[in-house]
Amino acid sequence: MVMAAGRGERMRPLTDSTPKPMLAVRGKPLIDWHAEALTRGGFNELVINTAWLGEQVENHFRQQSRTPLSIAYSHEGVDFGGALETAGGIARALPLLGEVFWVLAGDVFVPGFEFTQAAVNRFIAGGKLAHLWLVPNPAHNPHGDFGLGPDGLALNLPKDSAQPKFTYSTIGLYRREFFDGMAFGNPEGVKAPLAPLLRAAMDNGRVSAELYTGPWTDVGTPARLDELNQSTTTN
């Protein structure tokens, strides 16, 4: 599942007429980098949630007649008038997803990440509810989000912890069971963030993680987008 429903307030005015995942990085929309990487990994069934200018995302893929992807959409904007935040959006899309699925944000640029069946198999065998890829902290998030234990567990560390914390890349593997606390399919359109659910699961030892050190950018501001487009290096 690629999350593509946000308004992109920090990217305005660029996102006044274009949804953030459709902004071009090095010649193609951000969301195409994800779609192509997933396809290379053998994952051809994609769910995309939309809200702000979501018809542009659907029209974009409809025009790609040769795409090997089978794409389903969860149109939060049409159904509820706006985005449902991350957990709310995933819960809404659960009827379209399998028992285990990838989740990633449509507004990150991570050209070297490999989506592999081996990673899925390890996750299934490990029995955890979620597995996250963490990255070294960027300048805009210097204190990080979560810790990483020597046993591969993701840690919900306090703000004053002496242990290092890393930034959640937005790439993760999840079991449908992770969202059991929310109504299946989120029929009421409840808005809910993902972080509190992750922290609660971490406190119960149910989330694993690993560190990814390849190129990664949260394309959250026009300046970061400009910086990416001024560089020609993609790996």
Image (spheres, rainbow, N blue to C red):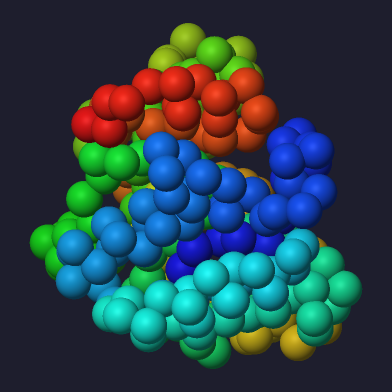
The quadrant holding residue 102 is bottom left
Question: What is the residue that sits farthest to the right in this orientation?
Answer: 81
Q: Which of the image's four quarters has the C terminus?
A: top left
- Residue under the image location 31 percent in, 41 percent down: 111
Q: Position of residue 182 (x, y in %)?
A: 67, 75
For residue 30, side relative to residue 17 (left or right): left
- Residue under the image location 28 percent in, 26 percent down: 233
Against 223, residue 129 (above or below) is: below
For residue 186, side relative to residue 30 (left or right): right
For residue 120, side relative to residue 46 (left or right): left
- Residue under the image location 41 percent in, 38 percent down: 26
Front position in the image: 128 or 2: 2
Q: Position of residue 183 (x, y in %)?
A: 69, 82
Question: What is the residue that sits farthest to the left in this orientation?
Answer: 118
Front position in the image: 29 or 89: 29
Against 141, residue 127 (above or below) is: below
Q: Position of residue 75 (x, y in %)?
A: 69, 79
Is residue 69 among the parts visible in the rendering?
A: no
- Residue under the image location 50 percent in, 81 percent down: 62
Question: What is the residue that sits farthest to the top in this orientation?
Answer: 162
Q: Position of residue 179 (x, y in %)?
A: 56, 71
The quadrant holding residue 133 is top left
Against 118, residue 225 (above or below) is: above
